[in-house]
Image (cartoon, rainbow, N blue to C red):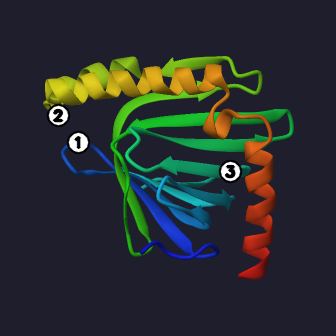
Amino acid sequence: MSPAPGTNIRIESYKHDHSFHRSWDKTTLIHTSDAVIIGGNDRVKVTEADGREWRTREPAICTFGRGQWFNTIAMIRDDGIYYYCNIGSPFSLKGNLLSYIDYDLDVKVYPDLTYTILDEEEFALHSKQLNYPPQIIARVRVAVKEVIEWIVARRGPFQNGFVQRWYERYQLVRDDHE
């Protein structure tokens, strides 16, 4: 049973060897279903593996599709919506903790929906250091292609109005639970 909308959850990402990678202190659930979990946060504390802490600068809508090898953070800025797509294992949600394994590669998407693939060198390095099995490497590559297909097709979080609609819902849910 998923926590109800309005519940605050913590998001944690790990590396392939299960070492801690990064956490987002507080994300408010907006929607949960058999297909997807959508949350929102704003100026949330992020903790890195080395202990550094920082706060996000803008509101964001986070989308985690069940069984998907990527998740999407849509950052709402004055000049448009920027997306950061983490390539990682399908998520697990236990209680108020959502976690996944981060597989290094990211797709950064700009407001005009052009995109850049980031961290190829990190992926190559960690593939060797952390001994990624061939099926994981192949699945990560497929996930990058899936993200690009979604961007081109304007699917899911990339469809027109998606982020705005969920951001409005986030503001209502957050205000109801403060």
**Amino acid at pointer 3:** Ala
- The residue where tag 2 is placed is 130
Disc on the earlier residue, 3 or 1:
1
Evaluate whether residue 72 shows in this view.
Answer: yes
From mark 1 to mark 2, how far is it between C-alphas?
7 Å
Q: Earlier in the sequence, mark 1 or mark 2?
A: 1
Q: In x, y percent, where is residue 67?
A: 37, 46
| Figure quadrant of residue 162 | top right
What crowding class fits label 3: few (fewer than 14 Cα within 10 Å), some (14-19), or many (20 or more)? many
101 or 54: nearer the eye?
101
Determine whether 29 is above or below 151 in the image: below
Q: Nearer the viewer, residue 152 or 109?
A: 152
Q: How far separated are the C-alphas under marks 3 and 1?
A: 26 Å
Q: Answer yes or no: do the residues labelled 1 and 2 have beta carbons within 8 Å?
A: yes
Q: Residues within 10 Å of mark 2 (few under 14, many from 20)?
A: few
* Residue 113 x %, y %: 70, 22
* Label 1: element kind: loop
Horizontally, residue 48 falls left or right of residue 111, namely: left
User: Of callouts 3 and 2, which one flags the residue occurring earlier in the amino acid sequence?
Assistant: 3
- In the image, residue 116 sits, relative to residue 76, either above or below, namely above
Q: Which residue is mark 3?
A: 60
From the image, tell me which residue sits under label 1: 16
> Label 2 is placed on what type of residue?
Leu
Q: Quadrant of residue 116?
A: top right
In the structure shown, which secondary structural element does the residue marked by tag 3 occupy?
strand
Toward the front, the furthest residue is: 34
Label of residue 110 in the image: none
Total marks in image: 3
* Mark 2: secondary structure: loop
